[in-house]
Image (cartoon, rainbow, N blue to C red):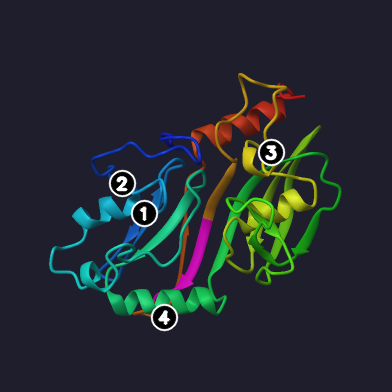
Amino acid sequence: MRNHVLVDAEGAEDKMETPPPLPPILYEDEALVVFDKPAGLVVHPAAGHQTGTLVDALRRYLPADSELHTADPDRLGLVHRLDRGTSGVLVVARTVAIKASLMRQFAERQVQKIYLALVMGRMTPDRGSIEGPVGRSPKDRVRMAVTSSGRSSETEFVVRERFPNAALLEVYPKTGRTHQIRVHLSGIHHPVVGDATYGGASAKWPRQWPPRPMLHAWRLEFLHPLTNKRVSVTAPIPDDFARTVQGFRAGSHS
C-alpha cells in the first residue's frame, strides 16, 4: 500500500498554479512510462481544470525537443485517462508512433484493464456482466448515464469479498467510456462507495465516508509496441482505499 494524497474533490475548481509533482513511476523504458496516478490529480486540461494537471507535469518531464509537444500539446503522450477521483495505473507514450500503437490496442480492445471497486449493497451474484450504452445524461450534461443515444458499453465484474452492506469487486471494463464503471455499477443499484455523483455517498457516516469514489485502476496489461511482449503493471492499493475496505470489513460502516 502507498499513501495517495488527495488534491480536491471531483468537480472543484482547480486552483493550482504550478505543475504538480510527477506521480510515482511503476515502469519505464525508452518507449513508454507507466505512472501510479493518485486520486485527486486531473489527467489533462478541461473546463474548470486548466492547470495543475498531469499534462503540466509531463511538459517538464518529456524532453524539450519531443515531437509530442507539437503533435498534441494538450495531451502529449496520454493514450487513455482516469477520472480525477480514480487512482492507479496510467500509461504514457514517449513518441507519437508509440502513442498511436497503444491507442490502437485500446481501440481494438487488446488491453486488459482490471479495477478494484468497493460498492454499496449486498451483491448477490459471484460474477456478472453489465451492458448498456453510455453517453451524456439528457437530464444533467455533467453526468453520464445509460441512454439510447450513448455508445455501446460492457463491464464485467467478479466479487472478491463480501461485507454486510458492501462488496469488493474486480472489474473488467471491456470498453472505455467516460465514467463507464461508475455508471454501470450505479445502474445495477451497487454504486461505488464515496461516489457522490452516482449515488455512492451517504450522510450516515459523515466522519468515515471517503471523499472520493473507491475505484482503483489496479492492473493494466498490453503488448509492448517495440517487443510485442506482454507487459503487466500493477498499482499498489492506496491507503485511503485500504482503510475504507477495512472499515467495512470491521463493521464500522454498518
Identify the residue position indicated by label 4 in the image. Answer: 228
Numbered disc 1: secondary structure: loop
Q: Position of residue 160 (x, y in %)?
A: 71, 48
**Observer-nearest residue: 229 or 164?**
164
Q: Which stretch is magenta?
A: 219-224
Spatial distance from mark 3 to mark 1, Cα to Cα? 26 Å
User: Which numbered disc flags the more N-terminal residue, 3 or 2?
Assistant: 2
Badge 3 or badge 1: first in the primary sequence:
1
Q: Are the residues tagged 4 and 1 within 8 Å (C-beta)?
A: no
Which residue occupies 55% across, 80% down?
108
Expressed as whole percent of the image width and height from the top left, the position of residue 50 reads 34, 49
Element marked by disc 4: loop
Dot 3 alpha-carbon crowd within 10 angstroms: few under 14, some 14 to 19, many 20 or more: many
Label 3 vs label 4, nearer the camera: 3
Q: Is residue 220 magenta?
A: yes
Label 4: few (<14), some or many (≥20) within 10 Å?
few
Q: Is residue 117 visible?
A: yes
**Residue lying furthest left:** 65
Q: Report whether 14 appears left or right of 237.
A: left
In contact (CB < 8 Å): disc 3 and disc 2: no
Q: CA distance from mark 2 to mark 1?
A: 7 Å
The mark nearer the N terminus, 2 or 1, is 1
Answer whether labels 2 and 1 touch (C-beta < 8 Å).
Answer: yes
Residue wearing tag 1: 45
For residue 250, above or below residue 137: above
Name the front one of labels 4 and 1: 1
The amino acid type found where label 4 is placed reads Asn
